[in-house]
Amino acid sequence: MAGLHWVSAAALAAILAASAPVRADPDRAPASVADLLAAPAIEEPELSPDGAAIAARIGPEGPLALFDPLRPDLGGRAVALPAGERAEWYLWLAPGRLLASLIREGEQPRTRLVEITPANGHIAQLGAARAPGAGDELVHIDRKAGFLLLKSRDRRHDTPAIWRVDLATGSFSQIVAAQPHVRDWVVDGAGVVRAGMGEKDDKSWLVYRRGEGDRFAKASNGAADTDPDSVQFAPVQGSDQGYALAEAPSGRIALYGYDFRKGRLGALVYQNDKADLDGFELGPDGKPAGVAYTDDRDRMLWFDPAMRARQAMLDAALPGRTNRVISASDDQSRLLVYSANASDPGTYYLVENGQAHRFAAINPALDGKSLSAVTTISYAARDGLKIDGYLTLPAGRDAHDLPLIVMPHGGPFARDSWDYDPWVQYLAGKGYAVLQPNYRGSTGFGRAMIARGDGEWGRGMQDDVDDGVAWLAKRGTIDAKRVCIMGASYGGYAAMWAAARDNPAYRCAISYAGISDVRAQLDFDHKTFAERAFRAWRHRIQGKAASLEALSPVTYAAGMTMPILIAHGTADQTVPVDQSERLHDALSRAGKPHEFVEYAGEDHTMRDPANEADFLARVGRFLDAHNPS
């Protein structure tokens, strides 16, 4: 059978638009809800080793296609897969040869690894088909040596094993068995599994071996006193030494040398004076090549001079955006770059000789539409603490006496970033300024900022949000009489809490998946904690409050007068739907007008675009009634 057939250029023209980057322009039509929530038109593009083709997925879980990097307007050639199978992931083995993990779902599910030759449609299976487990994750590939490593779980184990796949014969062999509580494995540059990260209750540790023929043993000091979610380890090939992210005396996550045999941190390599590090990369010589962090936006600081020069070239070619190389030709002459900003969900560019050529927009429905600029801001809270955040001003309107929507993030021990957010753009498109404060307790700014959030649910955290409103009002940017609060998860709690306390700073409140009964939520969460960790978590929430009921919006339902819209997904496994139902029932018993909607089957994050569109439409009507722009 033919392995390739042409996808019409007309069908893909919108996906592979070659227009200039979208910018806020008052003369352009506003983006509709459907535009803002459109599913990605293209996903996971990868440049071939010779730079002559790009393989990409057309839409979520859609077909694979191959494109000419410099002529995307010609459309793509679809890669034919057997009926009933889809690619979980794929990559180039060599020019003209793709490796893919195919999955068949249904009554007889299976997963198998295959090599595809798109030119003639030949598909060769590597190894035996297997029952699908928790999915295969590629952790290492060595094309020259002809093998790859997969991390995979099966139905008998809840922790992963490592499998070696010979790319010439297709043979599978398990090289590291699953171990109880070891949730991840660390591979060095030669493809040797060197360490495993274990975790049970509130303890974490490291198992380690120097070489492939050695047994794993627990490091003498382990990583038990370090938050496992904040640690990245990387061993250097042929050595007991390596590198790790860990908390520095300053309270920020920094890069250190690491002795794997002794399980001890070594010398400090780098720390940022403003933000925690998110990750790092090692160069071919085993030395740190660069570190990733987020201050006001995602950044990569390269130590390697060549990489630093490359990043400078990309940022000059695509200014005002975050730019990241996602794949490159073997000779590095062609780069496939993901480029985005807070007003653009992302665009892929082919960069060659310092010139950026647009390949494809992730959401072409936004092309030619008016989107609003997002700027970074900071202000002082009432106790002097610096609060960073983001302010979106509606395109085409003067930044004076604007209506405002405050959107505190979820978590609460999380953060907002300079990323595209369709909810923010929807509100700005309706004429509202939108404030997203990183209140005390937000992550990424060091341990001290996180600690300032302990015991501050509904108190200091809420004050920080309110202080942002006051700051904007004092500057004249907003009309202090036209402010509402909206959020999801903890942000939904903050909206409920503002309504429960009848905060005069707000005219209305909107909650999605918010927490109304703090004690009931803690009871729900209890099963995920060891007892000691649960007590510590409860104390972080309650602090000096008289009781958990004193922090619960449902406690104050009978006295609520602020208009509130409450929404929740019925399948939410993080904040159960009864959290919103409790407040709805209490308000109904008290005869308090409010709006309430449940979305069948939705989880903590909305996944069905139709439900999300319905929610935003309800938000729009609610704001039109209670805080018109």
Image (cartoon, grey):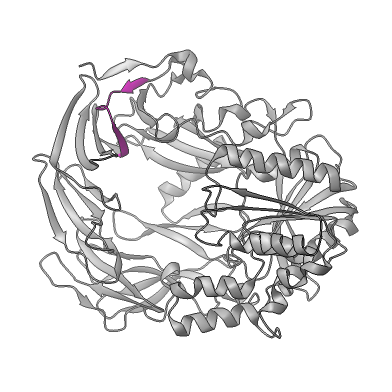
**Residue plotted at (55% across, 47% down):** 600
Placement of the C terminus among the 4 image quadrants: top right
Picture coordinates of residue 610, whole percent (x, y): 58, 37
Q: Nearer the viewer, residue 427 or 146?
A: 427
Q: Residue 599 appears at what percent x and percent y?
A: 59, 47
Picture residue at 53% right of the left edge, 75% below the top: 523
| Nearer to the camera, 338 or 553 | 553
Query: Is 210 on the left-hand or right-hand side of 29?
Result: left
In the image, taking residue 420 as reference, residue 481 lies left or right, namely right
Q: Is residue 29 visible?
A: yes
Task: Specify whether residue 83 is painted magenta.
Answer: yes
Q: Decide: is 625 above or below 437.
A: above
Compared across the picture, whether 424 is left or right of 189 comes to: right
How many marks can you see?
A: 0
Give whichever of 456, 597 is nearer the camera.
Answer: 597
Dominant secondary structure of the residues highlighted in magenta in the image: strand
Residue at 78%, 70% in the rendered image: 381
Q: Residue at x 55, y 76 (%)?
A: 251
Task: Please state the extent of the stretch shown in magenta in the rendering.
Answer: 77-89
